[in-house]
Image: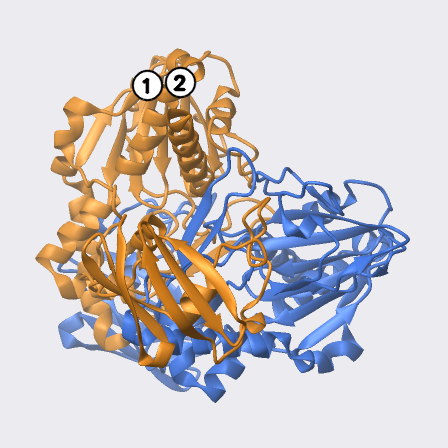
Chain colours: A orange, B blue
Amino acid sequence: MQVSDARLIDGGGAVELSLGGARHRFHALWLRDNAQDAATRSAGNGQRLITILDIPADTRIAEASAAGGTLSLRFEPEGKVIDYDGRWLARHAYDGVARQAPGWTAPGIERWDSRLHNQLPVESWADVTADRRALVRWLAAVRRYGFAVMTDTPTEPGTLCKVAELFGYVRETNYGRHFEVRTEVNPTNLAFTGLGLQAHTDNPYRDPVPTIQVLYCLESSAAGGENMVVDGFAAAQRLRAENPEGFDLLANHCARFEYAGEAGVCLTSRRPMIELAPDGELIGIRFNNRSFAAVTDVPFDKMEAYYAAYRRLGEIIDDTAMELTFRLEPGEAFVVDNTRVLHARKGYSGEGARWLQGCYADKDGLRSAYYAMMRAAVLEAAE
Amino acid sequence: MQVSDARLIDGGGAVELSLGGARHRFHALWLRDNAQDAATRSAGNGQRLITILDIPADTRIAEASAAGGTLSLRFEPEGKVIDYDGRWLARHAYDGVARQAPGWTAPGIERWDSRLHNQLPVESWADVTADRRALVRWLAAVRRYGFAVMTDTPTEPGTLCKVAELFGYVRETNYGRHFEVRTEVNPTNLAFTGLGLQAHTDNPYRDPVPTIQVLYCLESSAAGGENMVVDGFAAAQRLRAENPEGFDLLANHCARFEYAGEAGVCLTSRRPMIELAPDGELIGIRFNNRSFAAVTDVPFDKMEAYYAAYRRLGEIIDDTAMELTFRLEPGEAFVVDNTRVLHARKGYSGEGARWLQGCYADKDGLRSAYYAMMRAAVLEAAE
């Protein structure tokens, strides 16, 4: 990335330059704080060695020069000379970044509906354990679509934890390290019955919620019990397109969720159904009829419209045009990003058995594993 | 709670009534959705059996009567008659709830500074394991102050996990189920050196962050290495009192954090330093000079003020008037709410050893254990 035409502005409070032909400005303090020299960042682990208070408040750029792919700056009063790589600057440029409308999603996220049926993201256990590229494809699918299926795993209890350990760590909860999803006599949770379950995210009464869920099939001879997934980000954005005020009501007010269905447990949360970052990025969906508690954080004069938006979101989520249906066979598992993709199951009963196991893990570990494998692949390719 | 003087308003779209003398309105749909009858809620586990789509959109209250502590309603078109307990209604009333200024904190949270020194929340291992009331006191302290100390635990590796298991589950990460905090030759993290560490929250590059951290001392003969804690909520509110625009800049823009200091790990997050719920509740602080990455989500014309606010927050956090200092002796541990309370340590070196262990857990589990014990105590008292 060519760096050229660097000149000081604001009396050295910032620098303006061209990166591959595009003009960008960077502040002196931001540049100084992000210096990569050995006194600022640990060469071994990349962590910053100084605090913001170690940088003089009156830091200014005294001299700037650009040559080839490098920007060189001298900072005063420290007198430090620091070089910056043009590619790094281009990747971290912040000048002129436009604000997007609420509900935008991160790059690389692809919203979907039932039409994804023909390209269900699926890999086999044999492939992902033998070939790192297959594992990267599978993790990439979870990042892109918020779910992926895995086939042909060893059909034995606990295999689901091995699926989670492909990319992270099982998160233990009051339901155990993993839990059995089959009909029980005195179920602590309606999931442990033969009832159909409306599409939902798991454990919205937990804060933080488990960000990844693995569901794994051991027996599947009962009639019914099919699994369904719905893209909550697509549902929220459909709501926003139809009814922006309804979207805002669900995003700007906290709902409440609770679960106290077993001894020693009393989980409660106060979080919105549609969660946005401060700049409007859509980062989470919480939707679960079973644990939705009394909402008390919506003013009286907005409650009717809030409930109308909640109802409409439920209709969108229940719309078969939004859903993917598949039947897990023994040895098959699927993983969902529980902050985004809702899952459901059809009711089942009568002859035969249905036995699934579930466990939770964390999405940041999955993203980390994905990025680290991508980085390693880039480094190998460069060798 | 006396319920009286119930009358329909908005053509049965809502009801107005007196609860212990105060007037309140509740909507028909909200009431119907929150019915506690056996067809709406599972008697066994308390979960809702119906979805919002099972409730007719044109639900209206056809008849309302109040007697003693009970409100009785007939809903049309379903024709259902449902009773509501006046105490439940009073606890969940939402009519006339005033919006608070950004930065408010939940009831029961008490902000503190160095003056808390004389009433450090501390319990002993012998007490919390023998007497549930001592454990409740200790958990209550974590809720109230965001940290608490525990003394006289068995001095042996791994005891910290038993501390976490008093209230929840260890959250395993790339650092292990627990990790060793002592000087290493090739440290993957600056925590594993003798360097002093500025007050920080742990792992802001994780999303979700670990919401509880336990730090536990096995050896402490080195000079230095004292521990410090700072109330991040008190710091944020002090910033807001001095400089509301600076507070807003840190709350309304995402920072970035990253850690890639070991093979196979590449953790990144995009979250604000000061996290607010949609209605302005202060719910999280992320502050860590070592893993603070290049901020790219602040517009150019606000970056200078953003950095000034960041600096000022750092000065407040480093102010000795904000901090509590204590020295952990072998067998002592402390727990912090990692979404709120920052921890630090002074540098150490020379003769002697300092060996701590750390692990992560989740705050929702701690709150759940606390509420469940409180509920059990209330039930026992009522017997």
Residue B1 visible in image: no
Q: In this figure, what is the number of numbered marks?
A: 2
**Callout 1: SS:** strand
Mark 2, residue position: A128
Q: Residue at x 90, y 53 (%)?
A: B351
Please give left or right for residue B298 compared with residue A264 in the image: left
Q: Residues within 10 Å of mark 2 (few under 14, many from 20)?
A: some
Residue A310 found in image quarter: bottom left
User: Residue A179 placed where, x, y %?
Assistant: 51, 30
Compare residues A354 and A64 and report the one nearer the observer: A64
Task: Using the image, name the chain to which the residue with label 2 belongs.
Answer: A
Q: Compared to B8, does A198 lie above or below?
A: above
Give the labeled residue for mark 1: A123
Q: Nearer the viewer, residue B174 or B138?
A: B174
Q: Which residue appears at 47% of the width and 41% of the height?
A: B266
Q: Are marks 2 and 1 in contact (CB under 8 Å)?
A: yes
Along the line of sight, which residue is nearer the eye, B37 or B129?
Answer: B129
* Horizontal and vertical percent position of residue A42: 59, 51
